[in-house]
Amino acid sequence: MNDPIETLRLEFNEELKRLSTLKELEPHRQRFLGRKGPIQHLLSSLRDLSAEERPLFGKRVNDLKEFAESACDELHARFLLGEEAARLKEEGIDVTLPGRPRLFGRKHPVSCMMEELLDIFMEMGFSVQYGSEIETDYYNFEALNFGPDHPARDMHDTFYLRPDILLRTHTSPTQVRVMEHQRPPIRVVAPGRCFRNEDVTARSHVQFHQIEGFYIDRGVSFADLLQTIQDFLEKLFGAEIKLRFRPSYFPFVEPGLEVDVSCLICHGVGCAVCKHSGWLEVLGAGMIHPEVLRNGGIDPEVYSGYAWGMGVERPVMLRHGIQDIRLFTDNDPRFLEQFLEL
Ligand code: DAH
């Protein structure tokens, strides 16, 4: 057997059988089919043959070349597929694994309550004004009749940023700020965040929300105040609640009062939430002190007004049976996702 073409084909096939990776295949292809390889060499030797021998020999060498090329291509495709499959398997992509669910944000329950309150007041003819969370001592205290050494300041544990600049302890400073820029009749509610330097417990926090309301015009009476409060508390908690008005003291109103509603949990029978009194305190109110009107540039001989201030977290806690005010600021999605937007 000294047919060089047949010998080469056998040798090529023999080596091909031993290959198992793409990496091995390319040198093999190069060795047989490259410019300096044996097939090229046979093709070059054609010119030494006689004219009769040349066509047949040439055809056979070309056949071998085509055969070798397609054998290499086929093996290339097979190895590629195999290696790809092995890689995927090794990387272990489990396409049946369920995706990670995305959490969608919802309105915070305190925001929902605030919006509900604002809706009620807007329906009653009040417009909304926003004060500033950073206030001066003047608007937070002085203008509201808390002199520098007024004992009522003790109720407001204050975060001072500078001796005369502080984080507002209530929304009442908005009263005088609005009076300075508006003439009566003024009918405004002012919602917002307030701050007090208190121990954080289940019942008190350093930050909380209030909504302030006030009405100033000629002839505004105490009866108007009582009726307005009754109307909105019934809208908020339901017509079946009972109200209790108690005299109280705030420097910026005269007379001042506090308003309780019959306990929403036990309906007045007495439970842990109302400390067995049957009542829950919900807001402070009163007729705006003449001095405060004067500080806002409004003549108390001509005009009178009422005001109230109410916490926002408390009604949310009562409505949903939330026992710990800290939950509102913890940002735990397990807590927050329970509240569907109203
Ligand atoms: N600002 C008071 C507080 O935070 C609440 C308050 C009481 C507001 C009586 C008023 C009012 O407008 O008339 O404790």
Image: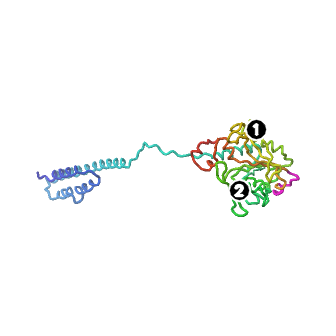
Q: Is residue 75 left or right of residue 111?
A: left
Is-magenta flag for residue 210?
no
* Residue lying at the far left of the rendered structure: 1
Task: Give SS at disc 1.
Answer: loop
- Tag 2: amino acid: Asp
In which quadrant of the rendered view does residue 163 lie? Answer: bottom right
- For the C terminus, the image quarter is top right
Q: Is residue 221 above or below residue 173?
A: above
Q: Is residue 25 above or below residue 227?
A: below
Task: Give SS at disc 2.
Answer: loop
> Residue beneath label 1, please?
242
Q: Position of residue 222 (x, y in %)?
A: 84, 45
Crowdedness near tag 2: few (<14), some (14–19) or many (≥20) residues, C-alpha within 10 Å: few
Q: Is residue 199 left or right of residue 257?
A: left
Q: Position of residue 123 (x, y in %)?
A: 75, 43
- Tag 1: amino acid: Lys
* Viewer-side residue, 169 vs 213: 169
Magenta residues, dominant SS class: loop
Residue extent of the magenta highlight: 293-303
Q: Which mark is residue 82?
A: none
* Viewer-side residue, 65 vs 301: 301
Q: Which mark is residue 157?
A: 2
* Viewer-side residue, 54 vs 7: 7
